[in-house]
Amino acid sequence: MAYQVKSIFGPTLQGEGIHVGMPCLFVRLAGCNAWDGRAETRATSACPYCDTDFRGGERLALEQILERLRGLLPPPGVPSSGPGAGPDPRLGCVLTGGEPLLQADAALLTALGEAFAWVDIETNGTRSCPVRPANVFISCSPKAIPGQAVVVEPDWWKILIPDQEGFLPRALASQRPVLVQPTMPDAGASDPQYRRNLERCLTLCFTQGCRLSIQVHKVIGVD
């Protein structure tokens, strides 16, 4: 089995979700079912706010992915255990895209779960997840894609506000943690719209018991 991989990078910090602020490596798989990645189709896609380049990349076998991960140094102060040497309690991995569950299979999830203390799969929820180890988590940021229902039962929800607020009742009813994240305009956090989005998130935290997610990696300026 080979995977179309856009990039493998790190060390960095997980900027979103339950493991926010924790050191990790990233595996970004190519391809998405919510947007084809072309600038001219972005505005009419299910993710008109997406700022990720997930097109292209290269075909890599599982062992090649693990080899690339082994070659990345851990963050300062973290022992160089890395993939293949057993999980270090402080080092995780984020499997993202695009939409990673278009490609990710049980073999990939098992290998990453064995190599890292924790693994976050960042998905739009429209593809079921293969069998996964207990330390591999599903973070679902649901998207309204025509004809493609959200089918996963995630470990936590990450709802973009206001764009995907329609999913909030379902997320709250699931009894799983619900993170609300203000949609970031192209102009960034300085855009007045971002402040309005943030204020709506704060209201949901105070009235619905949601948690706030603010994309820490963008705030501090890391990949």
Image (spheres, rainbow, N blue to C red):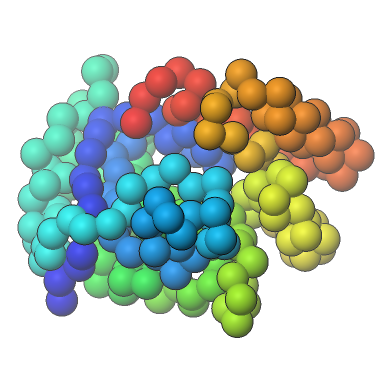
Residue in front for this viewpoint, 37 or 129: 37
Can residue 182 be seen from the camera position used here?
yes
Residue 26 in which image quadrant: top left
- Quarter residue 166 falls in: bottom right
Relative image position of residue 44 (x, y in whole percent): 56, 60
Residue sitting nearer the eye, 180 or 195: 195
Q: Position of residue 121 (x, y in %)?
A: 43, 56
Residue lying farthest to the right in this orientation: 207
Q: Position of residue 12 (x, y in %)?
A: 32, 29
For the question of whether residue 131 can be seen, the reply is no
Residue shown at 60% from the left, 82% from the top: 147
Q: Quadrant of the N terminus?
A: bottom left
Horizontal side of 38 relative to 3 (left or right) equals right
In the rendered view, does 178 fall on the left or right side of 58? right
Residue found 91% across the figure and 39% down from its top: 207
Task: Tell whether 203 sits left or right of 70.
Answer: right
Report the number of discs.
Answer: 0
Tell me the quadrant of the picture where the C terminus can be found: top left
Nearer-the-camera pick, 96 or 82: 96
Question: Could you tell me which residue is drawn at 70 percent across and 55 percent down?
Answer: 164
